[in-house]
Amino acid sequence: MTKFRVLGIAATAAAATALVAGSMATSAFAADGYNASVAGQRNYGPLVNLAQSSTQTVDAVNLPAGVGLYALHCKVPANPMDAPTVCDLSDGAAGYLPAVDAARATATLPIKVNAEFYGLNPNPTAGPQTSGESVDCRAETGNPRTTTCALYVLGAGRESANPAYIRVFPTTFLPVKAQRKNDVVTIMLDGATVKRGAKPTLSAKNDPVGFSVSLKSGLAPSVSANNCAIKDGKITALKSRGTCVIRITSTGGANYKPIVATQVIRLRK
């Protein structure tokens, strides 16, 4: 059984966004009879011939009252006994099933599984992350019995360190075209296209202004930022000086390569 040294998760209702230090105490709830499977595979059963991007479903049985679940697709650590530190936190790729007061005979948890992703540490300990790692789950490990990536299922909150809820599913993917196109990002700010290399300004005094990101491929990018908030097609400055750095990532597809891009916006009063 894989053991995790640091496991506790903070999340929104939409998805798990970070792992934080958790208690290693034994669960107060019995996990007898609990199990989780994906595509009919039990613990350590491989998920094979996956498409570049697909939504898989974690099927849980006998989930006790007060226990939620998280699902993350991550790069397998060099020591498989360690907790993963490079995971796909893009939209839909970090699944969260909230705990409820009643026991559940069955429960399902969807998770988007990507063959390529910009991986971040789900257990950051030094504040906001400024960089990550591009992961190609098709990369050879040099060991035919291991895979580069795996889907991890674990308990939520205080149950995150409870090995009774940890399940691991190695992932392998179908090949893609040898020659895929480079994707192109288009950023719209306040109704105007942001030219490549430009550093537009945003005032903290202004109301939210229009903001959008699109890709030539038509794929949906994941967008995150520091020092500004992006919501409902609008962007708002959170500070009156410095910069807002926007990170734009795409997991790629059968015809386009993954992309990682940044856009700097200068903040002013």
Image (spheres, grey):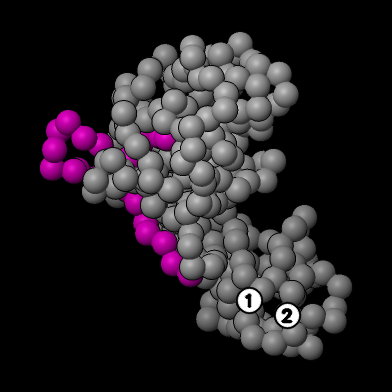
Task: Mark 2: give few (<14), some (14-19) or many (20+) Cα within 10 Å.
Answer: some
Query: In the image, which is nearer the foreground, mark 2 or mark 1?
Result: 2
Residue name at image x 21 percent, y 35 percent: 146
Q: Is residue 139 magenta?
A: yes
The image shows residue 183 at horizontal and vertical percentages of: 46, 57
Amino acid type, callout 1:
Cys
Query: Between residues 193 and 134, which one lies in front from this camera angle?
Result: 134
The image shows residue 250 at horizontal and vertical percentages of: 49, 53
Q: Is residue 218 magenta?
A: no
Look at the image and tell me in which quarter the C terminus lies: bottom right
Q: Main secondary structure of the magenta part?
A: loop
Look at the image and tell me in which quarter the N terminus lies: top left
Residue name at image x 66 percent, y 74 percent: 227
Looking at the rendering, the stretch of residues picked out in magenta corresponds to 130-152
The image shows residue 163 at horizontal and vertical percentages of: 42, 31
Residue 174 quadrant: top left
Query: Pointer 2: what residue?
Result: 239
Amino acid type, callout 2:
Lys
Q: Is residue 85 above or below residue 49?
A: below
Report whether residue 199 is seen: yes
The reply, left or right, for residue 253 in relation to residue 173 is: right
Query: Pointer 1: what residue?
Result: 244
- How many numbered badges does the structure rendering display? 2
Q: Please tell me whether mark 1 sits on a helix, a strand or a loop.
A: strand
Q: Is residue 167 above or below residue 75?
A: above
